[in-house]
Image (cartoon, helix red, strand yellow):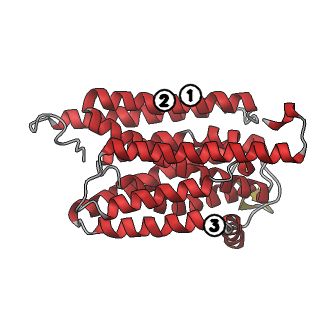
Amino acid sequence: MFSLETARDQFVSIEERFFDWGLLLGIIVLLIAIDLYRHRDDHAPSGKEAVIETTVWILLGFAFGGYVAYHFGSQAFGEYTSGYLIERALSFDNVFVWALVFTSLGIPLKFQHRVLFWGIFGALVLRALFIGGGTALVSRFEWVMILFGVFLVYTGVKVYLHRAGEGAGAAKTMAIVQRFIPVTKEYDGHRFLTKMSGRRAATPLLAALVVVELTDVVFAVDSVPAILAVSQEPYLVFASNAFAILGLRAMYFLLATARGRFHYLSHGLGAILVFVGLKMTLALWVHVDTYLSLGIITVILLIAIVASEAKTRRMRKKSGLPRELRGR
């Protein structure tokens, strides 16, 4: 495993380590500020805009991977890229659950970006806490790796076999939020809080934000242990999480209505979780090369995507749609 402390000379100064983290956090803050400024007018993103933004976020993620490779070497690059792909793959579930939440609450499309912006900002803080706690446990108690691994295998099998309860969980969470937080039916621009009969009350946007944050807790329980299976260096784990999470808003507007196209998504995600779970469980006795892990994760993702697209085309062909509409 790569370690930031041993990546360079053992006498590397504390100032240089602060620079590594300062650069990463500075880039994240800058990207968040740019994204918030671009969407300051609460417009509904078009399909073209979603495609461009998703592409840019992916390129930024891999560009930082290039920085990791240049400064820390190929081992660090492999761990960062593996973590980035795992988080990207598992993030598909976030996207579809968010779609269910927004539909259930009737959140207008033009306000959804604002909810997701603050939701993802909170997710970054939450992931940092999870990563800090997880890496501390693993470094101090090696047997925790086995527990994490068994949990991931169990979760992966459940994901692979069925995902029927996916929407029900979001609906239950939303019902709990509405029970404890007074929520108005009207919007007050893009504000999260407003006044109702002279008293403070939450708008539907705040209710949606709370649900988004709570559902991310559930997803973090899966994704953080999964990334710890490929790297236990907090810098790489947080960086791969951050760049994957930052691009979720654009990916949401691109894929929120495309759930039906990903027929084998649960199979692919389940297989990835089982693989990294087994890798983590056996890590104390068997070392799996970082690039072998990266290759296996990539192949699983490609198989799930290609197989899903092939099934979609077969279904559309069987339905008798005109040829020009089959690829849409």
Q: CA distance from mark 1 to mark 2?
A: 6 Å
Q: CA distance from mark 3 to mark 2?
A: 33 Å
Q: Which residue is mark 1?
A: 56
Q: Which residue is mark 2?
A: 60
Judged left or right of residue 230, residue 159 is right
Residue 271: where, in percent of width, then height? 50, 57
- Mark 2 belongs to which amino acid? Leu
- Mark 1 belongs to which amino acid? Val
- Mark 3 belongs to which amino acid? His
User: Which is more N-terminal, label 3 or label 1?
Assistant: 1
- For the residue labelled by badge 1, is the local secondary structure a helix, a strand or a loop? helix
Q: Which image quadrant: the C terminus?
A: top right
Q: CA distance from mark 1 to mark 3?
A: 33 Å
Q: Which residue is mark 3?
A: 162
Q: Nearer the viewer, residue 304 or 255?
A: 304
Category of crowding for the residue at label 2, using alpha-carbon neighbours closer than 10 angstroms: few (below 14), some (14–19), many (at least 20): some
- For the residue labelled by badge 3, is the local secondary structure a helix, a strand or a loop? loop
User: Which is more N-terminal, label 2 or label 3?
Assistant: 2
Category of crowding for the residue at label 1, using alpha-carbon neighbours closer than 10 angstroms: few (below 14), some (14–19), many (at least 20): few
Residue 193: where, in percent of width, then height? 69, 54
**Going 52% across and 44% down the picture, which residue do you hit?**
245
Category of crowding for the residue at label 3, using alpha-carbon neighbours closer than 10 angstroms: few (below 14), some (14–19), many (at least 20): few
- For the residue labelled by badge 2, is the local secondary structure a helix, a strand or a loop? helix
Residue 113: where, in percent of width, then height? 67, 42
